[in-house]
Amino acid sequence: MAYDPTADTIREKILDNIETTLRTIIEPAYGSTLTNVVRYIGNDFEVTNYPAVAIVPGLQRNDDSRLALIEHTLPITLLLMVRAQNWRQKIERLTADVRVALLSDYTRGGVALTTRHTGDEVFDSEPSSPLGAAQVNLDVLFRTLYHDPGAAQ
């Protein structure tokens, strides 16, 4: 296959799939309704609608030891935020909803080998604060052709 510079890369397809999947978190199928899903780009980030999640891709690791293939590991951190007096209960429920939604198709629409949930953490807040936050960490493994980041293998 010839490289098509106008096609989305597999990395972009994975990030799009994660964003689309997170937008499906709606009650009653889940315990939460996620109203704000954004891609985190630098410091330009303001949350006005809660619950919210920011998708933060990490430093992608590559292994090109296979003939004509590159195996990639894309770490992704999802920053979850809620605003409620019972924020601890809400953030725990949202964290579970996010894990269930994202692991329902671990191939990210058929372009990844697997999606691994590597952990999550709830951040403590001031007792009087109505804001709660957590992070969910994932590793997405995928392969591309050596000379074509848009061709999944």
Image: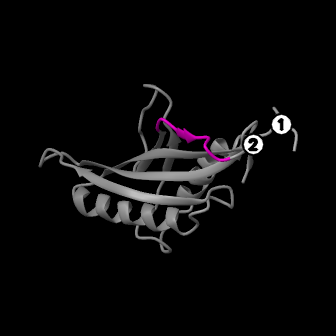
The secondary structure that most of the magenta stretch takes on is loop
At horizontal 52% and vertical 46% (from top left) the residue drawn is 73
Cα gap from disc 1 to disc 2, whole angstroms: 7 Å
Circle 2 sits in a helix, a strand or a loop, which is it? strand
In-front residue for pair 150/63: 63
In-front residue for pair 5/121: 5
Whether residue 44 is visible to the viewer of this picture, yes or no, is yes
Residue 56's x, y, as percent? Answer: 46, 40
At horizontal 46% and vertical 68% (from top left) the residue drawn is 100
From the viewer's perspective, is 26 left or right of 107? left
In-front residue for pair 56/37: 56
Residue 101's x, y, as percent? Answer: 50, 65
Q: What kind of residue is marked 2?
A: Gly
Q: What kind of residue is marked 1?
A: Tyr
Circle 1 sits in a helix, a strand or a loop, which is it? loop
At horizontal 69% and vertical 61% (from top left) the residue drawn is 110
Q: Is residue 59 magenta?
A: yes
Residue 13's x, y, as percent? Answer: 67, 47
**Quadrant in which the C terminus is drawn:** bottom right
Query: Looking at the image, is 91 positioned above or below residue 53?
Result: below
From the viewer's perspective, is 24 left or right of 109? left
**Quadrant in which the N terminus is drawn:** top right
Q: Using a 10 Å C-alpha cutoff, classify the residue at mark 2 as few (fewer than 14 neighbours), some (14 to 19) or many (20 or more).
A: many
Query: Looking at the image, is 135 positioned above or below residue 44?
Result: below
Q: Which residue is mark 1?
A: 3
The mark total stands at: 2
Residue 150: mark in rendering: 2
Q: Is residue 42 magenta?
A: no
Residues at discs 1 and 2 in contact (Cβ within 8 Å): yes
Residue 36: mark in rendering: none
| Magenta span of residues | 58-66
